[in-house]
């Protein structure tokens, strides 16, 4: 009896070698050996041919791409937590299941968030730049003064896994935790985190010293931090974003920092990635903000865990079982 044909799994970007090896062992895996970002035409060809597509957050799997989906495409097993790059509703209407890789990047992203919460008020990037340029003349009592974070109010926007992990870390630094989310946490979790819930985002923003953006990008959260809401912040407040750039009105944020209406920001994500607004780069060079190239989840351990989740989701689906990380419209 002939062996059952392996499903064609097309992977859009280069993944860790051990993950790619396992994909080749289990499936007919077509890899992206030079790690180039696939064009819309290449993505359209991939969905036309594949039984399973494994995209990442850099691949826009929208309705235009999905209109080319062949009859064999039944699963999009995304390598990443967010699914804002996929038109999930259109995929489901075409009978395509979508999965992601939640939970495995919580600590990595929370660690980076905490690092940025420290970096901006304490002016770490500025200090490094002074040494890099050979401009340090020695210690002085009044030079390079930053702001203490102990006792400051941290407003967390989005209190899911990552938001709660950020809260635990911030509590260890003596910060007071405030949060806004569409759903209030159970009382037991609130008590453990010593967190204050604000049903009104506007009211929370007006009272906190640092805002940490930890919510997903959905139609409901696009420009959730609008120009109007940004103006509610105190002039000595800071914003940290390790979630998605689209949650903040980036142009309004830039105007406020340039005008001195906001103390600063630390951004790991941008509204038009991979493009970065030149005005943000100018502010970073002037030491007004800290910017990073979307590396909040970039640990070897995290990427391996993500790859293993992708494999489990594909294997479960191919074997006729419900994938453990299936995305539902109610989750968006």
Image (tube, grey):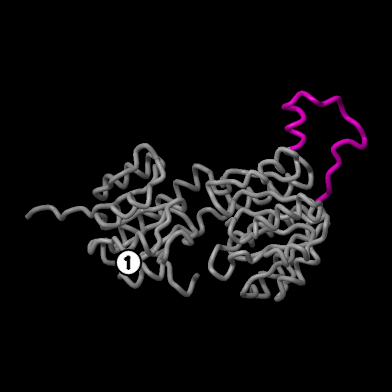
Q: Is residue 114 magenta?
A: no
For residue 123, what is the image quadrant?
A: top right
Looking at the image, residue 308 sits to the left or right of residue 30; the answer is right
User: At which x and y percent is residue 11?
Assistant: 34, 48
Looking at the image, residue 217 sits to the left or right of residue 67; the answer is right
The quarter of the picture where the N terminus appears is bottom left
Q: Tell me the crowding category of disc 1: few under 14, some 14 to 19, or many 20 or more residues within 10 angstroms, Cα based.
A: many
In front of the other: 121 or 43: 43
Looking at the image, residue 61 sits to the left or right of residue 140; the answer is left
Q: Residue furthest right?
A: 141
Looking at the image, residue 47 sits to the left or right of residue 267; the answer is left
Query: What kind of element bears circle 1?
Result: loop
The residue lying at 65 percent from left, 60 percent from top is 249
Q: Which residues are magenta?
A: 126-149
Q: Would you name the residue on which mark 1 appears?
A: 96
User: At which x and y percent is residue 221?
Assistant: 59, 67
Asked if residue 250 is positioned above or below residue 328 in the image, the reply reads above
User: At which x and y percent is residue 93?
Assistant: 34, 73
User: At which x and y percent is residue 332?
Assistant: 50, 70
Asked if residue 293 is positioned above or below residue 216 in the image, the reply reads above
Q: Is residue 130 magenta?
A: yes
In front of the other: 161 or 230: 230
The residue lying at 64 percent from left, 60 percent from top is 248
* Main secondary-structure element of the magenta-colored stretch: loop
The total number of labels drawn is 1
The residue lying at 46 percent from left, 59 percent from top is 85
The residue lying at 76 percent from left, 55 percent from top is 256
């Amino acid at each position: 009896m002939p062996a059952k044909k392996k499903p064609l799994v097309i992977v859009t970007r280069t993944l860790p070698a051990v993950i790619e090896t396992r994909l080749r062992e289990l499936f007919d895996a077509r890899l992206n050996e030079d790690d180039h970002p696939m064009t819309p035409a290449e993505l359209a060809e991939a969905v036309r041919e594949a039984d399973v597509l494994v995209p990442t957050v850099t691949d826009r799997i929208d309705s235009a791409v999905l209109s080319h989906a062949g009859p064999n495409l039944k699963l999009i097993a995304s390598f990443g937590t967010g699914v804002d790059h996929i038109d999930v509703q259109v995929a489901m209407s075409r009978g395509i299941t979508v999965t992601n890789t939640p939970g495995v990047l919580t600590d990595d992203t929370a660690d980076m968030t905490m690092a940025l919460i420290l970096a901006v008020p304490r002016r770490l990037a500025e200090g490094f730049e002074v040494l890099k340029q050979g401009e340090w003349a020695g210690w002085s009592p009044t030079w390079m003064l930053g702001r203490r974070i102990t006792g400051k109010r941290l407003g967390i926007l989005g209190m899911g896994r990552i938001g709660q992990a950020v809260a635990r870390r911030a509590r260890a630094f003596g910060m007071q935790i405030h949060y806004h989310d569409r759903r209030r946490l159970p009382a037991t979790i609130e008590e453990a985190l010593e967190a204050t819930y604000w049903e009104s985002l506007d009211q929370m923003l007006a009272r906190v010293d640092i805002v940490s953006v930890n919510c997903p990008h959905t139609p409901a959260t696009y420009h959730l931090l609008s120009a109007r809401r940004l103006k509610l912040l105190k002039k000595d407040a800071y914003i940290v974003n390790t979630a998605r750039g689209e949650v903040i009105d980036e142009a309004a944020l830039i105007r406020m920092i340039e005008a001195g209406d906001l103390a600063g920001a630390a951004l790991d994500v941008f509204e038009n990635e991979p493009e970065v607004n030149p005005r943000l780069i100018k502010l970073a060079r002037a030491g007004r903000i800290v910017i990073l190239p979307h590396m909040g989840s970039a640990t070897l351990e995290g990427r391996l865990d993500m790859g293993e989740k992708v494999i489990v989701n594909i294997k479960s689906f191919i074997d006729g079982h419900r994938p453990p990380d299936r995305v539902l419209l109610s989750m968006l």
